[in-house]
Amino acid sequence: MKNKNLRQHKIRKVIVLGSGALKIGEAGEFDYSGSQALKALREEGIKTVLINPNIATIQTSEGMADRIYFLPVTPFFVEKVIAREKPDGILLSFGGQTALNCGVELFNSGTFKKYGVKVLGTPVETIINTEDRALFVHELNKIDAKTPKSEAVNNVEDALKAAAMIGYPVMVRVAYALGGRGSGVARTKDQLFEMATKAFTYIKQILIEECLAGWKEVEYEVVRDCHDNCITVCNMENFDPLGIHTGESIVVAPSQTLTDSEYHKLREISIRVIRHLGIIGECNIQFALDPTSEDYRIIEVNARLSRSSALASKATGYPLAFVAAKLSLGHSIMELKNSITKITSTCFEPALDYIVVKIPRWDLEKFTKVSKQIGSEMKSVGEVMAIGRNFEETFQKAIRMLGQGMNGVVANNGRIRFDDVEHELKNPTDKRAFAVIQAIKQGISVDRIYELSRIDKWFIYKMQNIVEMEKKLKSNPKTRELLLEAKKIGFSDRQLSLIYNTSENHILDLRKKYNIHPFVKQIDTLAAEYPAKTNYLYLTYNAAEDDIDYSKANKNAVVVLGGGAYRIGSSVEFDWCCVNSVFALRKLGYGTIMINYNPETVSTDYDICDKLYFDELSFETVNEIYLKEQPYGMILSTGGQIPNNIAMKCHESGLNVLGTSPLSIDNAEDRHKFSKLLDELGIDQPEWKELTTVEEAKRFADKAGYPVLIRPSYVLSGAAMSVAFNHEDLAQFLKKATDVSSEHPVVISKFITNAKEIEIDAVADNGKIIIYAISEHIENAGVHSGDATMVFPPQLTYIETIRRIKKIAKDVASRLKITGPFNMQFIAKENHIKVIELNLRASRSFPFVSKVSKINFIDLATKAIMGKKPRGTFNTLDLDWVGVKAPQFSFSRLRGADPVLSVEMASTGEVATIGTTLNEAFLKSILSVGMELPKKDVLVSLGGDENKHKLLPTIKSLSSAGFNIFATKHTSEFLTSKNIPNKMVYKAHNSQKQDNIITLMQKKKLDFVINIPDDFDRSVTEDNYLIRRNAVDYSIPLLTNIQITKVFVDALLETKMDDLEIRAWNDYK
Amino acid sequence: MDRKAKLVLEDGTEFEGFSFGHENSISGEVVFNTGMVGYPQSFTDPSYRGQILVLTYPLIGNYGVPGAEKDDYALLSHFESDRIQISGLIIDDYCEKPSHWGCKKTLSEWLKENRVPALRGMDTRALTKKLRHNGVMLGKIIFEKDIPFEDQNKRNLVAEVTIKEPLEYNEGAKSKIILVDTGAKNNIVRELVKRNLYVKRVPFEYDFSEECYDGIFISNGPGNPKTCKVTIENIKKALSQDKPVFGICLGNQILALAAGANTYKLKFGHRSQNQPCVLEGTRRCFITSQNHGFAVDAKSLPNDWEEWFVNANDGTNEGIRHRKKPFMSVQFHPEATPGPVDTNFLFDKFAELVKK
């Protein structure tokens, strides 16, 4: 009971470790949990120090922690911060696997002991017991808790032996696996050989386990304090059977198909386990439950806050992270009050009177060559959560929330269709739910669907209800009774309009006539047993009254629309914008109403705003909320593209959209209108044309010359944006673009190469710019701005260019009468500047420029939007420091994906660091996204003559600095001709017997890869792809961009690790 | 489309829903339960005798109803008594097609067999808020034919649920206890025999003073404890001895009344699986399953008695014990079914005392 006396120990200062950039397996949920932990600590009067290079998070905002370090969460940097800050304690469980792994390493190296830092909460020994599978099984055996039959093995040979003993198929598990990386089912000896070989390249131990594929998967979130009080806050059931990672599964809370006996049996085991392991705070336990008996296995225990715990917090209203932080300080659960009722105890288990459905969001279409199958590895990049009072309603809401063009279970215009639906059911992909629906429609029996998919029949029956309702609607007139019945099981106006072949407006009019509107219900943790003091709300048609009194208009309140599901191109940065907008509104004295549905966010924390509607961001839902609330107006410009997309519709329907007029937004979003506008203003832009036919497009491309860029309007992050180098490309990409956005025109433009890309983020008030920030990209134009490495303030851009950019921004702001945030992107060649994009909303880089400049752009924007005339002069150009924002890629998670950059965004997150020189800031940031510096052996493979010549000085410096250069055939010949010593290595297909690139990588003979593809020559793609892909698979650092390679090598050769300054954000002033 | 029917409360409020149970008008006290699992157990819990039960969890019937298998002691394995005890059921979303390996029939079939009316499609949250605000009320489920409100608490509910003749379980075990059946749940019997006790289950007014026994266990049960006058007198006599006495729920109230304390009716009671109960004088808090409308007034406890457990939410009494003698009882349900099993250790404690 060593935590018992913690409060007597007097903890004054605590370090909290963040999780770094958003990546697959570790996303926004840790901004939420870290923010909660910081809040809990500060409430106790404890000084907080946060280490997290993720600059776009809310936790790294002013006032969240006393001191904030934008540094990598690695033992090297954390130790340096400890040495400098001299904290009393450290929290390891709020920053995901990244923080946990870092903490375990520091514990093992004796660093905590050396500096007298106490690990608060769950002891590190416990963490190690849960992370090392063999220890884990050993511990659970002691308390008769069943785990899958398994063998821990340390080499490939033992792996094969163990599998032979257990019997195929076997589950291969990797210890310390973040999001289950490298784990999977091996059905044959050959498969196992391949998987084991790969795994042992980056891990010392793997586990061969009995395969429980097809069992139900059930999770419990368990809390324990140092007085041994234990509660289970939430249980959740996966729609998908075991074998599909819980992060990839559709999940419902609470469990639906478990009896009292099963529910409480697993609950009791959960508590037995948490007690035995000695966890203090929170943990997550995953069970496999036999669908034909009460037999079970414990699959995993996560002794930290997790994706599931964030989901459980939002699903129940129980602030798990906050409570866990308090418990780690030695409080008992009993002492804390329920933060929703404010009078009842926190020592209780929430009773839900609604159902929650989570669906992951995948972006696999953005990657070439990636496998779409889902399994024991995580591939999804975000998730949505829907709340309702039956499964059908909630599930349909959740499908729409994904924002991938689906209207619900049915009425999707045949967007998704499988040729072999049984194959899809047996081999699930991100689209499997739609395979179930197609199967139902085709008349395949529920038993057969279950047999193939192992999705519990309960879910299949529910989907069947929706399919049947569609049939009923089609064959019956639109009576009030029928429409209401349809609304109760989640049909949207859009679905109904498609079924009845009419407009959405017509359905809305009908609903008004029949008085069919949703009701608003509160989430109160106790199923109405006690009154809730907070307004955590959702909409449902399965009700007879509102929980909230709407008799008076809420004229002082402003609605802020959130950013929806995290996806490639839109994630935590928009949450930061929304939350800061809410903070600004509060300071200005307005009531605040938030609408959002992403469980990983801080904006969906019910104490951030006065009212939180955890619901859809569709026009239909926003309109219903607006009609009830009668607010002053709405802010749409901080949530990214999703709110922007309904701006016109809101405006037309008479909703008060605050800030820049939706008419102006339309002028910027519609490529056609925007290009015309630029022409009128005399602003240069790449030659462009609106497309109607392929023939026309080909004529344009021939005239302008390849390459050309194809893009649809109204999209973010370059969905379906492509560069075509020839006619074949063009035809193919055009099809893709029209698939993504058939409602808006497609634009084709000249793609300019060898140009610099520059962005401006600004805030204007009634057409006049109040503040702006100019950032430059290190990569040349052609790399999506979300994947580019950004430097702010610009270090290498001509003053002349900056002046011209300012002028253009000024003209555009004035012409469109911008009020609020906006972002423009330019390409510059010498001093010739062309505009490529305008967004009349906050952009991805707003938190970055705000934090580096130390001026909150969103605060100013909100003031401008509310007509509060912000004043002041702001210096954002002449700073004594520089910020570098670097992208985080998750290629290692996406088996098969080609890790190369293009106009379509591929990064899943970002970091930004600050330094006094570009080199310093750059190195810190690239280390923050997990790059390891080369030690000795560097492989260089440069496509095309131009790339070879351009990188010659860089390779020369590397060689002179003592690195061994390995090179592919042509590159080697070139280097040799320039007298740079190098060793030629064979490409994969050239050599069977001798070592080739791939075998060298397998043998860890290479510790760094530079592979620059030649965009203009596609014939070598396959070889280059193999080099890049294997580098990712064998965890060898890889660079594929020429400008980044130059900056990286410069920084590497000039700066030593120990020179990187350990300086808090607070101290840059 | 199912037949429409309505729930009418004594204040005149009406809620309309669709029938999925037996179609017959009934009246009873309307109470709500916030548990999310365990409807087969809840509905057969004799403590619900005569009540119209509102479930706040909206999706009901998901895993159907299990079969009538009996255990070694001829007790139904999956139910708490031999019949459905509630007189009516109110829910939101009924699951017509259940999915579970143990499912033998649908909830609707089971309710119809037991002639229990049930309505779905109700705003159970609105209804619950009303009950929370106004306190429990009488109500009636009406199919066309109206009927008067009937307060089942005026009946002797315990007399309706107690056994008629004594029953013996695990005969021959070393220690013998008297289980006073004021509406005992099957799982109380199971927990006792599991600890190798010889259980003699007796009707609620049965005079056991002449029997030879090692301990007394007073079960749960429905209604106002003060109606169990004879039982209270019997327990009073038992308290003059030193043999262990343990009570659950109604048993807690009867023990308190026998000890000279008072009981009262709660505004809307505790019916849930998430009630936090603090072990007095410690920082230990247990999550408990509950089902009661009456409570012990802790202030009225005589000096030689003390509070054992207290509700962490509203401070009401959750258990009492004698300061010196082995007499104790809890307001919650350590036998669970449905609900958490965290306080199951209390049966160990009782068995230990009995065997001493």
Image (cartoon, coloured by chain):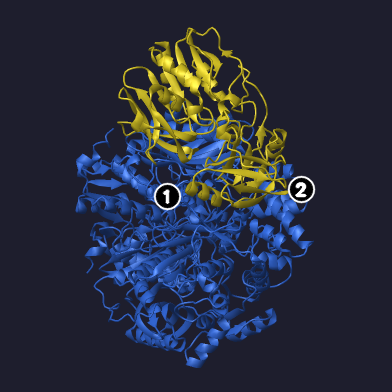
Which residue position holds label 2? Answer: A444
Indicate the position of residue A19 as horizontal and vertical percent values. Answer: 38, 53
Is A852 or A111 nearer to us in this picture? A852
- Relative horizontal placement of residue B154, taking residue A791 as reference (left or right): right
> Which mark is nearer the camera, 1 or 2?
2
Give the vertical position of A539 relative to A150 (above or below).
below
Q: Image quadrant of residue B356?
A: top left
- Chain A: its colour in the image is blue
- Chain B: its colour in the image is yellow
Between the residue at mark 1 and the residue at mark 2, the CA separation in whole angstroms equals 53 Å
Looking at numbered disc 1 in the image, what kind of residue is underneath it? Lys
Indicate the position of residue A820 as horizontal and vertical percent values. Answer: 41, 78
Quadrant of the rendering where the C terminus of chain A is positioned:
bottom left
Indicate the position of residue B98 as horizontal and vertical percent values. Answer: 67, 40
**Chain label for disc 2:** A
Q: Please tell me the numbered disc located at residue B213.
A: none
Instruction: Please report the residue visible at 30 percent of the width from the left and 72 percent of the height from the top.
Output: A855
Which residue position holds label 1? Answer: A1005
Indicate the position of residue A639 as horizontal and vertical percent values. Answer: 46, 68
Identify the element where label 1 is drawn.
Answer: loop
Is A305 or B298 nearer to us in this picture? B298
- Relative horizontal placement of residue A438, taking residue B55 as reference (left or right): right
- Asked if both marks, 1 and 2, belong to the same chain, the answer given is yes
Quadrant of the rendering where the N terminus of chain A is positioned:
top left
Q: Image quadrant of residue A176?
A: top left
Compare marks 1 and 2 and give the one earlier in the sequence.
2
